[in-house]
Image (cartoon, rainbow, N blue to C red):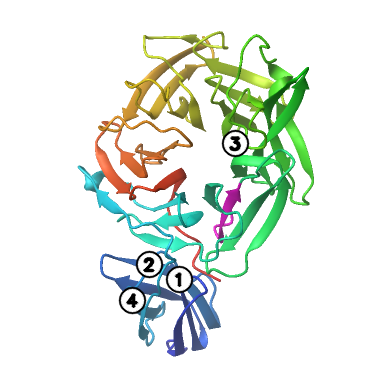
Amino acid sequence: MVEPAAVFDLTVTLADMPTVLEVRWRTDVPALATVIGRFAGGEVRVEEIEAVTDHAALLVGIPALTEVAVEVLPADGGEAGTATVVTGSLPSWVPDVTTEADAPQAAEGGFTVVSAIGLLEGSGPVVFDGAGRPVWAVTRLLAGDSGVTRARLSRDERAIVYLNMAPSADGDAQIVRVPLDGGELLVTLVRGIHTDFVELPSGGLAALGWDVRTYGDRTIVGDTIVELGPDGEARVVWSAYDTFAPDLDEDYPNWYPGDPLAEDWTHVNGIAYDADSDDYYVTMTWRSRVLRVDRGTGAVVWDLSDDGGSFARVGSRYLLDQPHSVQPTATGVLVFNREDPIDPESCSGATDITLNEAAFTAEATWVYTSEACLLTTFLGSAQRLPGGNTLVAFTNSGQLDEVTPAGELAWRVSAPIGTGFGFAERVPRLGDGFP
């Protein structure tokens, strides 16, 4: 008869990320165990999947300066091991936030990955838990980390990947991969990438780039979809010039950071990827359009707009007004509409657009704007969560809202004046619990 496993040589130490715990122990026989970290207001746990004698686990998702009671429980009912440790501090640039909710019982939980954009101390990725507490933040800001617009949990769930956008079409963007335990950063330089990116299932990523062209004495800037393969090779999938031509009778805003005199024609800001159709979705903010683009050919599958697109609008509610983010849904697309920044009655927010691709009709069927009628002048995002709630980021207002389909506020994080939130992404967990 095999004796139950006994835990010994248990050690719990702070990882390079001071809110992440490295738990190591041994057992006298190969065994499985559950590792639980309990703290005021929550717990995290890891279930082992391989019976070994030398064990290691990561506990991720614990607030800073928090006492944690760690327990290792052998699956066979053997002798447990316990330890207590206090997590470290997060960097000073992480904003002090407040939380509130009208219907907290309706919140879907999980972790929110967001780029925090500070006017004074720099920008970087931060992760909030379901209680609105920061539980992870990059500890080493790189030189130039003032253009961090998008942060994501990596597809393998072992790192946070973020984009520090390029200063121009000829400058280098930084794609930075930070392991959840805060280990060595991997920095990839990519020419001309800006604003948003998505990791691809096959490896590599897709991002937005600039396409700068000259028309006589005018410099006009369009945008591209650029893929970066696992081998680092880049290819342009689509350019705005493939589908549209600038109207040379029109003057365009001067928002291109690489040249204050250049005209920012399309201002593509958001990208999403649909693995089922192998298509990209992009927002053209200045043109108030959403495009669906075939990944293989670069052809536009459809063009959604209120004026002259592929779909006829149903209903009186407009569809798009300076959209920034886009997410394909089972019934169409969810967008974040920034609205007109000079219209005092404009309210930024999320719009759910139902598409009938057989009849080619489109209708705005659900809209959420904050009760304060916030106006988002840069960035902004909306994400439909698995349970039906929607996560909305009002960037320059420093506000993240999770709302129910009925518009009830289920979760809100607000940052002080001087801090904004870029794209926000909710994920159910942080990592698989192993180094």
Total numbered badges shown on the rendered structure: 4
Q: Which is more foreground, mark 3 or mark 2?
A: 2
In the rendered structure, find residue 68 and report the number of the disc placed on it: 4
Label 2 amino acid?
Answer: Ile
Q: Work out whether mark 4 precedes mark 2 in sequence or the reverse, and give the earlier one.
A: 2
Where is residue 305 drawn, in percent x and y? 52, 15
Left or right of 294 in this view: 384: left
Where is residue 301 drawn, in percent x and y? 64, 20
Q: Is residue 161 magenta?
A: yes
Q: Please report contact status of discs 1 and 2: CB closer than 8 Å, yes or no.
A: yes
The residue pinned by badge 3 equals 273
Describe the element under mark 1 as helix, strand or loop. Answer: loop
Label 4 amino acid?
Answer: Val
Q: Quarter of the image for the C terminus: give it.
A: bottom right
Q: Which is more foreground, mark 1 or mark 3?
A: 1
Q: Please report contact status of discs 4 and 2: CB closer than 8 Å, yes or no.
A: yes
Q: Work out whether mark 3 precedes mark 2 in sequence or the reverse, and give the earlier one.
A: 2
**Looking at the image, which is closer to me, 305 or 96?**
96
Describe the element under mark 2 as helix, strand or loop. Answer: loop
Q: Please report contact status of discs 3 and 2: CB closer than 8 Å, yes or no.
A: no
Describe the element under mark 3 as helix, strand or loop. Answer: strand
Where is residue 378 drawn, in percent x and y? 47, 35
Read off the magenta span. 154-164
Left or right of 9 in this view: 247: right
Residue name at image x 56 percent, y 12 percent: 309
The residue pinned by badge 2 equals 62
Q: Work out whether mark 4 precedes mark 1 in sequence or the reverse, and give the earlier one.
A: 1
Q: Report which quarter residue 298 is drawn in.
A: top right
Where is residue 38 drawn, in percent x and y? 31, 72
Label 1 amino acid?
Answer: Val
